[in-house]
Image (cartoon, rainbow, N blue to C red):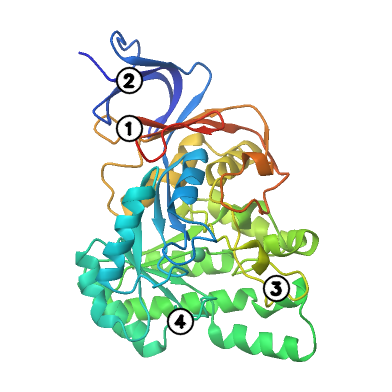
Amino acid sequence: MAYDMVIKGAKAVTPDGVKEADIAVQNGVITKIGSDIEASGATMIQADGQYVFPGAIDCHVHFNEPGREDWEGFETGSRMMAAGGCTTYFDMPLNCIPSTVTAEHLLAKAEVGRQKSAVDFALWGGLVPGHIDDIRPMAEAGAIGFKAFLSKSGTDEFRSVDERTLLKGMTEIAAAGKILALHAESDAITSYLQMVLANKGEVDADAYAASRPEEAEAEAVYRTIQYAKVTGCPVHFVHISTAKAVRLIREAKSERLDVSVETCPHYVLFSHDDLREKGSVAKCAPPLRSQQSKEALIEALSAGHIDMVSSDHSPCHPSLKREDNMFLSWGGISGGQFTLLAMLQLALERDIPFETIAEWTASAPAKRFGLQQKGRLEAGCDADFVLVTMEPYTVTRETMFAKHKQSIYEGHTFPCRISATYSKGRSVYREGEIVSGIDGA
Ligand code: ZN
């Protein structure tokens, strides 16, 4: 049998564990994983000593296009994902102008993405006041799910939900067979504390963290779980930052509620000390937590209580990152390129099997969001994969692919690097270069 491409001599990270194997690809699909696959006539990639992971699926990025391409955009953003070993991303409905809250906006944005993206993608729709009737049409237009904020989103165009909108919206989302992705922080708690602190003139890193305590996350998670019981809506809790919230979600799962949870690499690698030291590149919401909380979150992740890991890549124009007032600085960490590397660092430090990393970064999001062809190194799946070389890599501005080279990861050293990424059998990144970009090859 003739193949288009054969990866030879790799350590393939399959759902059953790491196997020394060749991987054969034909027409963009993995056709065989096994030993000594005949490569004559095929493009042969010698990958001795390298690990091959399924391409990561990042269900949480903000590319801000259309309307705020000066923050990121599909072209730079998708190239950054490719450079980080991600072959499918889900773009959030806010920050772009207009917000993705109607089917028309969703389809227009999808067209822009199709023209510019180097890898596959899906789009979230937004659940915001006044747009409940748009949920069904957006679902039919292909929305992967719907995003809502319990606290302020950071942009005026994308409003947080009131309780009535949330309950009604969850009912509609359930009826459309979709999932609600929720930013879970209590607006009552965070707004009140911010006001109290700002009135006292406290606007530094400590004040910002104090305004968004762990209780704000726990309260929002608890409340939404009750709403999920009332409405029957499947819920995905995004960027969960505390073990406390994970416990509540676990309890809901034990009651057979259809809920899932992601955390982000920055909550696992960094802590509030980094916000103090590095300033606003480390500002995000929920905020980076204490060392102790970080440790508890890592324990919850290692124990298998968190379904998946996503980047929440949330960049902005550099002028919006302010150091004089942490409340007024844009909140969001630019880290879309580093999710897989961050998880591999954790794996090596904590002795976590690589197949578990592949689950968190690829197979779990594929399963949760119904991408049956993706997320696994398995015959019949899309040939989305990434080659990892076990040599240290220090992040520099020159090797960052995000539009703006400001990131908490600058100067960070990972124990390994991404050497190549393939999207449906097409080479999209190799050794520091985007190799085919939007045209394919
Ligand atoms: Zn986000």
Q: Nearer the viewer, mark 3 or mark 1?
A: 1
Q: Amino acid at mark 1?
A: Ala
Tell whether label 2 touches label 1 (CB within 8 Å): yes
The quarter of the picture where residue 45 lies is top left
- Measuring from the top left, give residue 261's x and y in whole percent: 45, 61
| Residue topped by disc 1 | 383
- Measuring from the top left, give residue 350's x and y in whole percent: 63, 41
| Residue topped by disc 2 | 5
Q: Is residue 158 left or right of residue 416?
A: left
- Measuring from the top left, give residue 159's x and y in whole percent: 45, 82
Q: Quadrant of the N terminus?
A: top left
**Residue pictured at 50% horizontal, 26% vertical:** 51
Q: Which mark is residue 209?
A: 3
Q: Which mark is residue 160?
A: 4
**Residue pictured at 75% horizontal, 91% vertical:** 199
Q: Amino acid at mark 3?
A: Ala
